Image: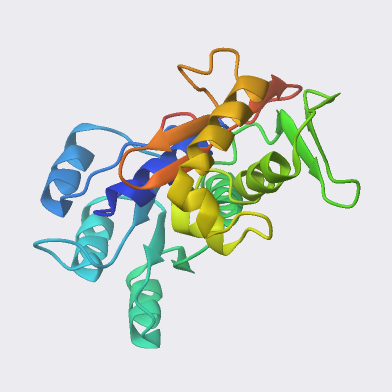
Amino acid sequence: MIEDDLELAEVLSLYLKQFNIEVTNYEEPFLALSSLALHKFDLIILDLTLPSMDGLDVCKEILKNHDIPIIISSARSDITDKVTALKLGADDYLPKPYDPRELEIRIRTILRRFNKSLEKDELKIEKIFKLDEDKKEITKSGNYLKLTAAEFEILSLFLKRESFIVSRDDIFENSNILNSDYESSGSLAVIINRIRHKIEENPREPQYLQTVRGMGYKFIQWKIGRAHVWTPVTPI
């Protein structure tokens, strides 16, 4: 991945890891080009707005020297950029923002097309936590969690925005229960702590509900099982 937004790169890397896709990110394009001369990668995820070198020039340089599929991942909305990238030889163009699930599917599709020898079986991904909005229930590994109304509402928001950072403002803006009294009294931190005691093995070192200093919280979960496993030959 060649992406100078390190927060996005981390989120995508963590998400793709659960599908057995290993990501190496470079925020500096010249360093990325140097790495391509030394290491073998299966696919490149390329941003267009990069420091010191435009992404379209990076795309051109890569395809001039390497036979490797490229997915453009860009917030640039100009149709000219998309047309130019595809004309240069990029294999796909994914406009930001997008759901990481779409990126994962596009990676699989392109890798299957480029490497026919890959096994085409699937990873079995099982969610540890499941939300049933109709029943107002959240389960962990099939077991019902006893939550207060505020705990349910906040944990539901984290599950809906899994793998993305959720700020304190996001929580208050999307809550029907919390109000300014919670914010001023610090009760949100208390509720987060209660949730951790109900879902974490060790609330002092949370595995699922993590604090991102100065930004908010991030909820991450996965449980990987193997039936027939589809695995890239080399890491991305």
Say which quarter of the image contains residue 40.
top left
Residue at left offset 24%, top offset 65%: 55
Q: Residue furthest left?
A: 52
Q: Is residue 66 left or right of residue 114?
A: left
Work out whether residue 76 can be spotted.
yes
Image position of 200 with respect to 106: above or below = above
Q: Nearer the viewer, residue 68 or 197?
A: 197
Provide residue 183's location: percent of width, then percent of height. 47, 51
Image position of 215 with respect to 73: above or below = above
Image position of 122 with respect to 48: above or below = above
Q: Residue furthest right?
A: 135
Q: Nearer the viewer, residue 139 or 70?
A: 139
Provide residue 202's location: percent of width, then percent of height. 54, 13
Provide residue 135's location: percent of width, then percent of height. 91, 46
Say which quarter of the image contains residue 59.
bottom left
Residue at left offset 24%, top offset 55%: 62
Q: Residue furthest top?
A: 202
How many numbered dots are placed on residues in this image? Answer: 0
Provide residue 17's location: percent of width, then percent of height. 50, 32
Work out whether residue 167 can be spotted.
no
Q: Nearer the viewer, residue 196 or 54?
A: 196
Q: Is residue 132 left or right of residue 87?
A: right
Here the colouring is rainbow
Which quarter shows the C terminus? top left
Q: Is residue 154 left or right of residue 180?
A: right
Say which quarter of the image contains residue 219.
top right
Residue at left offset 77%, top offset 37%: 130
